Image (spheres, coloured by chain):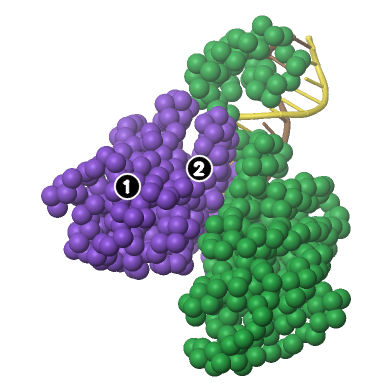
Chain colours: A green, B purple, C yellow, D brown
Amino acid sequence: MDMRDIAKLAGVSSATVSRVINGLSVVRPATAERVQQVIDEYKFIPNGSATTLKYGRSSTYGLIIPDITNPFFPEFIQNFETILADTNYNMLMATTASHPSKVQKTIHRMLVSRVEGIALLASEIETEPIEAMMHNRVPLVTMDRRLVGRGLSDISVDSTSGMKQAVEHLFRLRHRKIGYIGGSAGPTISDHRRDSFFRALKEYGLAADERFLRVGNYRVNGGEAAMESLLALERRPTAVVTANDLTAIGALRVIHRHGLSVPEDFSIVGFDDIELSDIVYPPLTTLHLSQQELARKFVSALDGFQPDSHVQGKQFKVETTLVVRNSTGPVKKRRTASTKSTAAR
Amino acid sequence: MDMRDIAKLAGVSSATVSRVINGLSVVRPATAERVQQVIDEYKFIPNGSATTLKYGRSSTYGLIIPDITNPFFPEFIQNFETILADTNYNMLMATTASHPSKVQKTIHRMLVSRVEGIALLASEIETEPIEAMMHNRVPLVTMDRRLVGRGLSDISVDSTSGMKQAVEHLFRLRHRKIGYIGGSAGPTISDHRRDSFFRALKEYGLAADERFLRVGNYRVNGGEAAMESLLALERRPTAVVTANDLTAIGALRVIHRHGLSVPEDFSIVGFDDIELSDIVYPPLTTLHLSQQELARKFVSALDGFQPDSHVQGKQFKVETTLVVRNSTGPVKKRRTASTKSTAAR
DNA sequence: CTGAAAGCGCTAACAC
DNA sequence: GTGTTAGCGCTTTCAG
């Protein structure tokens, strides 16, 4: 069943059917209605692949996510897809267990499907081979890589002001020894978050003590391991800022496991403000990142690209703001601090 | 740049290029290699929409998820997409904020894109209008609706044996007053889970006490509200089985908020075994549901359908098994039970 | 083993 | 306001 069949049944030509379906107002209302009736009666659905073939436009964007199991991503996907759906676009989605070879294959598949752009949220991945494959066909928009180029845009989270607010908040609560549990070593995003933390410390005249610095992996178990090691210290920090909420949650668990409480014994600050951060006990003080804004910027970076043009991409920024909940509190007057410090692990 | 261009550059015809790309072994190796070189040099990527147009096959399945923010779904998506990617299939994904009108539009878009089948994980949605639209074009596979038909299959979670294990486990821990917090009223899935709980109770000679029965919404806040109301009871249950892990987590929070502990004062059993259930404190005893198996069954239901045939769909089942963690324990010898029972809320 | 050619379904010129 | 038609890029008979 194609437009020609509908045309025959409605006593018009296939061109008119096409015009009706696309809402071109040139068609006489009576004709349009007759055509529409036939369409409805036969539940006709046009074949999009013909349109895609003719115009190269597929009304589809690709989205590649490293690990959908990290709650940050579902929230993003939700927002991203909602925006696309509103403009009748499809979302072709794929995950990569951070497996670069899978990324290559995935992008190839997406390009075969003639997506009009690809959002790649996998900051740890090398994009040279990918960019080669993209070959300026469609825009590539990455997250937190801070690199732009021909047909390559980037959306980055600017943690500067958020980190400053976090450190200020802790400073006012009289914290002076503030630790940091970072993300995985490697990706720019990890460096950026850690560096803005350091800069914020400096602004408040605090020393960046190497001994309070740990590396995580953006997941719960990384936060746990790092916190264990922090608790094993003779002289512990009184507060810890983390590279994301999952890391903070891991830290929280370890603190509880050691019979300590938050925020009485320890203050914890997260990053991202995923939904979970408000559900966990105690609800996390964290740097809020607007998923909606992030998704909107991705879509506009994707949209704002002339097809096939070799236009230079743009660098977008998304700001963060501190949300104070219950995982931060004033420094406890020390008493038994030195007596219980060695037991850990 | 199309196959004809490549053909010219390699001094062959476009038919040969097509054969090389599709790995048809009829081509003489030397020719194939020459063609492949040109393809690589020009980074040629064939236009899938032409193939889709010609053969109606898009190598794409659609997946519709109600609320991706429920961690159950990301885990499913991950598994589903991995299976598809292994066979070079694409996944077109959409979410619906359980908004039926969006489902209609989404499915229409997917059919326009010529997906080869649609997985619909939204048990609360009426599918009549959808089935009409599907019009037996491609298979529709639903979750937990327990309805099959022409081109309509269903994958259901069989909670019978899991619930039996759960009740047995609690019974052995000497629980006799076991409550239940269900899912949202309405969907078959909620009825099924609750009924298998009742049946399990009966097998152990326990009465299904209406007063210990609550309705939730499969989300944390539903579990919270239900647990509040259970705690307000004069005579409380000693254990609660829930319709999913998020509900259990909500219950857990309320119990903690009331200064009680799990499993000392209360035992809680979840359902689904989402990753979070092992991260939460205490880790949940829950009914494990294999996401991998679920995803595999979806894919095989989707695959096993002859295109355009009006074949009857199948009913698939996925079993659950109890995973014992730390949210269940023996009933406490009662002491002050009656004195503290009224304070709640 | 390779090439020529038809046709998948749609849409935008262009003609009327 | 409506119809005719060419052609998007691919695959696959069929011929050679």
Q: Is residue B87 above or below residue B154?
A: below
> Residue B53, position in %: x, y?
57, 39
Q: Is residue A192 above or below residue A234?
A: above
Considering depth in this image, is A309 or A254 the residue closer to the camera? A254
Residue A321 in view of the camera: yes
Residue at (69, 60) in percent of width and height: A324
Numbered circle sitting on residue B74 = none
Residue at (76, 15) in percent of width and height: A26
Numbered circle sitting on residue B234 = 1
Label 1 residue SS: loop
Residue B11 in view of the camera: no
Question: Mark 2 belongs to which amino acid?
Answer: Pro
Identify the residue position indicated by label 2 in the image. B66
Separation of marks 2 and 1 at Cα, in angstroms: 37 Å
The chain identifier of the residue carrying mark 1 reads B
**Left or right of residue B213: residue A128:** right
Question: Mark 1 belongs to which amino acid?
Answer: Glu
